[in-house]
Image (cartoon, grey):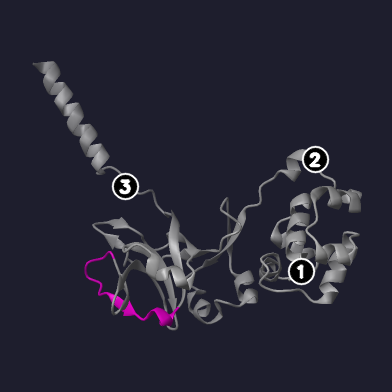
Amino acid sequence: MSFFGKNIKKIRGVKGLSQQAFADLFDLKRGTLGAYEEGRSEPKIDTIILIANYFSIAIGDMLTAELTVNQLLRFNDSLTLTPEELEREQFAQIPCITEKTAHDYIEYYDNDAFLADLPTLTLPLNTEKDFIGYTVTNLEMTTHDKGLFPKDVVIGEKVPKNVITKLNNGTVVLAVTDKTLILRRLYITDKGLVLRADHKNVDDITVDKKAVKQLWRVRYVFFRRMPDFSDSMEDKMAFLEAQMKELRDSI
């Protein structure tokens, strides 16, 4: 495997270009560029020549070793930026599944071109990990007016298949099967993977591990409305303490 992916990622960092901006320069899909940078795909020789010539970098240097920032600055003065720009952090570009694209995702979840056309979220997350956004469409993960409601967005981190059975019971996951996307809590049993809703009137779904195409562990949530914290345990304790203080002061 060549160093091409690492080097174009470093060039982007020096130039301060997002994946989309860099891809647009060379008529590439953002997902395709991401696959190059992560080593999941190798570009055609025409693409390598085009990028190398654009930045005045020898093809051999692009492919055979990881370039340093100093090398890149020597290759082309136009790469020189201010120190503030050189240190600028690259945020993760996260594809987001919406209600309109959910059905197509089941079929094209591993298609880079399809993923590149999904709307994206830009978040300060680890760019070395794979994340997916998902828009909640039902009330299965609600209980007593709390939980996830339609239009909320969850951010899931991809779980390798050999790690799925090591997850803690009760972990909220997004499971991708041949037929549907399921956002529920995961429980590992002898019969398979049990996906359980928080809503008490929704039946469990049991699936074989082999039937799961992808599994995403929910790490972050964006609520469409402000969550109600008024009856939290901390608030109740604070209220009781205030009442006790008033009682003591009155004695």
At horizontal 69% and vertical 71% (from top left) the residue drawn is 32
Residue 165: x %, y % from top left: 38, 70
> How many angstroms separate mark 3 from mark 2 (CA)?
45 Å
Q: Is residue 189 visible?
A: yes
Element class at badge 1: loop
User: What residue does disc 1 label?
Assistant: 2
Of labels 3 and 2, earlier in sequence is: 2
210 is within the stretch colored magenta: yes
Nearest to the observer: residue 66 or residue 48: 66
Tell me the magenta residue range. 198-212
- Quarter in which the N terminus is drawn: bottom right
Q: Is residue 137 visible?
A: no
Disc nearest the viewer among 3 and 1: 1
User: What residue does disc 2 label?
Assistant: 82
Give the image quarter of residue 223: bottom left
Q: Residues within 10 Å of mark 2 (few under 14, many from 20)?
A: few
Residue 51: x %, y % from top left: 84, 65
User: What residue does disc 3 label?
Assistant: 228
Of labels 1 and 2, earlier in sequence is: 1
Nearest to the observer: residue 29 or residue 71: 71
At horizontal 34% and vertical 68% (from top left) the residue drawn is 186
Residue 127: x %, y % from top left: 61, 57
At horizontal 42% and vertical 69% (from top left) the residue drawn is 164
Nearest to the observer: residue 223 or residue 52: 52
Residue 99: x %, y % from top left: 47, 71
Q: Amino acid at mark 3?
A: Asp
Disc nearest the viewer among 1 and 2: 1
Lateral position of residue 220 relative to residue 242, left or right: right
> How many angstroms separate mark 1 from mark 2 (CA)?
29 Å
